[in-house]
Image (tube, grey):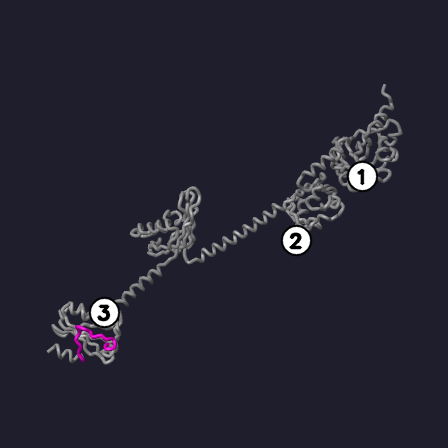
């Protein structure tokens, strides 16, 4: 037969405080361990609300767990919280709750079960176990001997994680309470101690870069409410510098969605963010350079291009040509690239060989300026001038690059041709004028006159000799009268011309007669000591003609 006191003996031998409660958490009965755990006797606890003994900071979590135990009959619900002792201190305990319908008093006699109620009224059965007083609740375990190990393991883990591990409680409106825990990495990263962080309300918000503060706080609230990711933000370190942090958040919620705790891991992404900013600056600078280069390319009154010599497969797409090529040639940039010869392929068939040779020489010389005609897509003939430069070969394959500027010089060629034509006409006219200024006039079969007007310069000297010889040969004249009535003066060179003309006439069998020598010319001849041998002198043209035409 079972000992009637065995049940109470077993209850008192259990190291946990066992109790039953109504749905409002009021104690129905409790085991004697409550005196060692909380300092109250079972009779003193009778009728008290367990919820009123829970620490204010743990109350919301307790309420959520308690409701779950009530609503899910038979489910074992575990929680950790602080319970108030009779001496107003608090004890960390682990509570295990289970809703049940068949109520049974913990004691068989009135000592422990005087307030018990037999029957079928719903109630909550609870077991409470003391935890190590210095270990935070979230690191506690159900077995007391593992608590200190867990705390040590947690410290080791948070030390090797290259980031700040932290958590804090949350209000029902999703606002944050002061931090409850911060890992030691905070001190290594930002110079603040975890004790400073936990003990200074609002420290995190005050350290955010003022320029980002409103944005970061708004993003944090969105992350808490909707689970959106947190953007990187800047936090001021103790030495005044700013760090870039990336925080990942996790919110623990009740069944109805009310937030309880927020857990976070904040990583230092300063180097990555600075690299991103540097890359962004470089990309922006590159974009500016591209836009500037494009502007310069389009402003050049010609075509800028680049061609490669080597393996055609990878180099065909590498060729570059500015869009002005379409205005210049009528062909698109794509067509220019597809044509292996580029501008060479546009040369007229008759000029193709010469143009190809010129381009080959340009590749060999390394730099050149060459001209060529092309036939545009519309069939128009144009002239182009290329200023090219060949870059040194690179790579084992000896791939070379030629870069150049091509200008439309069709108008220049037209002007040059026009100038050449005009120059030729001017030269012909000048020659004609010279010839007219030294005319050879035959008077009869024997006599001809060659009148001179003005000074005898180098061009007229050549014309004089040439006209004299041509006239003698053409007319077989025996006597040529050189009329110098219109010559104001002579110099040494002019006299040499006269002597040369006389000798040339003699070689052709003719005689040169000089008539109409002015006093100034005669004085010059005397001063120079020139006798003009082989030349007959007459005072006037009339006298000369009278002497030789009778």
- Give the residues in magenta: 525-539
Looking at the rendered image, the disc whose residue lies closer to the viewer, 2 or 1, is 2
Q: Is residue 471 left or right of residue 372?
A: left
Separation (CA) of disc 3 from disc 1:
133 Å
Q: Which mark is residue 402?
A: none
Q: Residues within 10 Å of mark 1 (few under 14, many from 20)?
A: many
Q: Quadrant of residue 46?
A: top right
Q: Quadrant of residue 303?
A: bottom left
Looking at the rendered image, the disc whose residue lies closer to the viewer, 2 or 3, is 3
Which residue in the protein does label 1 denote?
54
Separation (CA) of disc 2 from disc 1:
42 Å
User: Please, is residue 334 above or below residue 107 in the view?
Assistant: below
Q: Nearer the viewer, residue 444 or 154?
A: 444
Q: Residue furthest left?
A: 550
For residue 107, say whether it is visible.
yes
Q: Is residue 521 left or right of residue 16?
A: left
Looking at the rendered image, the disc whose residue lies closer to the viewer, 3 or 1, is 3
For residue 258, say whether it is visible.
no
Q: Secondary structure at mark 2?
A: loop
Q: Residues within 10 Å of mark 2 (few under 14, many from 20)?
A: few
Q: Position of residue 416 (x, y in %)?
A: 33, 62
Q: Residue furthest front?
A: 529
Q: Residue furthest right?
A: 110
Q: Nearer the viewer, residue 48 or 250?
A: 250
Which residue in the protein does label 3 denote?
463
Q: Position of residue 66 (x, y in %)?
A: 77, 36
Q: Residues within 10 Å of mark 3 (few under 14, many from 20)?
A: many
Image quarter in which the N terminus is found: top right
Q: Is residue 528 magenta?
A: yes
User: Please, is residue 430 above or below residue 408 in the view?
Assistant: below
Q: Nearer the viewer, residue 49 or 457?
A: 457
């Amino acid at each position: 037969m079972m000992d009637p006191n065995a049940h109470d003996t077993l209850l008192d031998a259990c190291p946990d405080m066992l109790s039953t409660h109504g749905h409002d958490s009021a104690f129905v009965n409790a085991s004697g361990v409550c005196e060692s755990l909380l300092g109250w006797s079972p009779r003193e606890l009778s009728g008290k609300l367990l919820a009123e003994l829970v620490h204010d900071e743990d109350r919301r979590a307790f309420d959520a767990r308690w409701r779950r135990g009530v609503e899910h009959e038979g489910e074992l619900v575990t929680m950790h919280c602080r319970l108030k002792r009779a001496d107003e201190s608090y004890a960390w305990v682990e509570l295990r709750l289970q809703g049940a319908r068949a109520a049974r008093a913990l004691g068989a006699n009135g000592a422990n079960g005087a307030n018990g109620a037999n029957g079928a009224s719903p109630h909550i059965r609870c077991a409470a176990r003391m935890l190590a007083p210095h270990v935070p609740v979230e690191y506690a375990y159900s077995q007391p001997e593992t608590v200190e190990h867990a705390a040590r393991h947690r410290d080791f883990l948070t030390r090797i994680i290259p980031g700040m591990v932290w958590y804090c409680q949350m209000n029902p409106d999703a606002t944050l309470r002061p931090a409850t825990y911060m890992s030691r990495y905070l001190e290594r990263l930002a110079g603040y101690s975890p004790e400073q962080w936990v003990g200074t309300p609002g420290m995190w918000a005050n350290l955010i870069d003022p320029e980002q503060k409103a944005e970061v706080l708004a993003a944090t609230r969105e992350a808490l409410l909707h689970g959106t990711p947190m953007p990187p933000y800047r936090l001021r370190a103790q030495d005044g510098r700013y760090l870039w942090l990336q925080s990942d958040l996790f919110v623990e919620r009740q069944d109805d969605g009310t937030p309880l705790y927020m857990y976070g891991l904040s990583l230092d992404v300063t180097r990555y963010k600075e690299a991103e900013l540097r890359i962004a600056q470089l990309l922006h600078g590159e974009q500016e350079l591209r836009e500037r280069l494009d502007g310069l390319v389009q402003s050049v009154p010609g075509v800028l291009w680049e061609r490669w010599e080597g393996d055609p497969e990878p180099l065909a797409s590498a060729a570059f040509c500015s869009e002005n090529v379409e205005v210049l040639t009528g062909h698109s940039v794509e067509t220019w690239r597809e044509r292996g010869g580029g501008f060479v392929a546009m040369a007229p068939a008759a000029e193709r060989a010469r143009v190809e040779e010129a381009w080959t020489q340009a590749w060999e010389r390394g730099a050149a300026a060459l001209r060529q005609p092309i036939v545009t897509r519309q069939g128009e003939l144009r002239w182009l001038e290329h200023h090219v430069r060949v870059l040194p070969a690179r790579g084992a394959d000896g791939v070379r690059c030629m870069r150049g500027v091509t200008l439309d010089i069709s108008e220049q060629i037209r002007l040059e041709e026009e100038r050449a034509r005009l120059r030729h006409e001017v030269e012909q006219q000048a020659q004609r004028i010279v010839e007219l200024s030294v005319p050879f006039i035959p008077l009869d079969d024997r006599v001809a006159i060659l009148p001179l007007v003005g000074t005898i310069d180098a061009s007229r000297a050549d014309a004089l000799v040439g006209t004299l010889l041509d006239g003698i040969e053409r007319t077989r004249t025996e006597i040529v009268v050189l009329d110098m009535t219109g010559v104001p003066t002579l110099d040494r060179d002019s006299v040499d011309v006269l002597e040369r003309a006389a000798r040339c006439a003699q070689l052709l069998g003719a005689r040169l007669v000089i008539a109409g020598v002015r006093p100034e010319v005669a004085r010059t001849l005397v001063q120079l000591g020139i006798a003009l041998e082989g030349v007959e002198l007459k005072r006037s043209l009339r006298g000369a003609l009278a002497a030789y035409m009778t």
